[in-house]
Amino acid sequence: RVPGRMSKESLKITLLSVYLSQDLHNIIRIDKGLSYSTGAATNKFTNYGTLDIFADSDIDNMQTITNIMFSEVDRLISLPIDQEKFERIKRGLLLGYVSSFEDNATIARFYESAWLSLLTMDGFVQIEEAIEETTPEDIQNIAIRYLVREKAIVNHDAPTLSYGKTDR
C-alpha cells in the first residue's frame, strides 16, 4: 500500500514508478527480449493506492522476469540513483503535465485535484515546483519505505508486483 492522491508523497511515488518503468523496459524488453509490455504504474485513490510492477510474458519466462523485477527494486533501494537519468525523467514528467491540458476532462480533473488539495493539504500543490525540488534521494527513500519485499503481492498470471493491501 502506498499513499493516495492527497498525500504529500504522491508525486514522489509517481516519479518512482516512472523511474522503475524505464529501467524495467530497458532490461526486460530491450536488453533481454523477455516481454513486449513491461513497466511500473501507480493506482491512486484519494487516501491510498498501489504501485504495480508488471510484464507480459510466456509462461516459461515468468519466474525469470519476476526475479529481475525484485532485483531492480533491490538495486533501487541499495544503490544511488543516477542523477542525470533522474533529471531526464523529471523533464519528461513536466512536459507530460504541460501537454496533458488538451481536453476538457483533463482540465476538470486538474481543478478537482486542486480543490481536494486545498481542502486536505492546506493549500494548492505547485506541481512544477514539487517536481523540480524532488531529489534522487527522495525517490530512494520512498522506495525504501514502500517497496518492502515481504509485502509484495506476486501475481504469476502475468508477473506483477503490487505493493498494497488487498483489504481496506
Image (tube, rainbow, N blue to C red):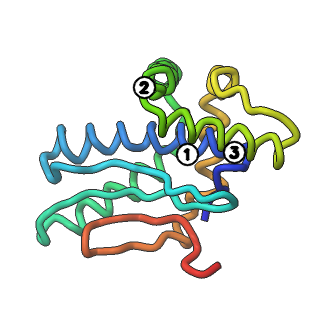
Residues at circles 2 and 1 in contact by the CB criterion of under 8 Å: no
Name the residue tied to disc 1: 78
Circle 2 Cα neighbour tier, 10 Å, few/some/many (<14 / 14–19 / ≥20): few
Foreground disc of the pair 2, 1: 2
Disc 3 residue type (three-letter): Glu
Residue 10: give x, y in percent of width and height.
64, 45
Q: Is 133 situated above or below 73? A: above
Q: Is 58 situated above or below 25? A: below
Q: Is 71 situated above or below 93? A: below
The tag earlier along the polypeptide, 3 or 2, is 3
Per the model, the C-alpha gap separating discs 1 and 3 is 20 Å
Q: Quadrant of residue 63?
A: bottom left
Q: Quadrant of the C terminus?
A: bottom right
Disc 2 residue type (three-letter): Glu
Circle 1 Cα neighbour tier, 10 Å, few/some/many (<14 / 14–19 / ≥20): few
Q: In terms of depth relative to the viewer, which is nearer, 106 or 124?
A: 106
Q: In terms of depth relative to the viewer, which is nearer, 67 or 136?
A: 136
Q: Can you name the residue that lies furthest to the right here?
A: 122
Q: Secondary structure at mark 2?
A: loop
Q: In this image, 56 relative to 100: left or right? A: left
- Residue at the location (55% across, 72% down)? 150
Name the residue tied to disc 2: 102
Circle 3 Cα neighbour tier, 10 Å, few/some/many (<14 / 14–19 / ≥20): some
Name the residue tied to disc 3: 9
The tag earlier along the polypeptide, 1 or 3, is 3
Q: In this image, 166 relative to 144: left or right? A: left
The tag earlier along the polypeptide, 2 or 1, is 1
Q: In this image, 144 relative to 31: left or right? A: right
Q: Quadrant of the N terminus?
A: bottom right
Disc 1 residue type (three-letter): Ser
Residues at circles 1 and 3 in contact by the CB criterion of under 8 Å: no
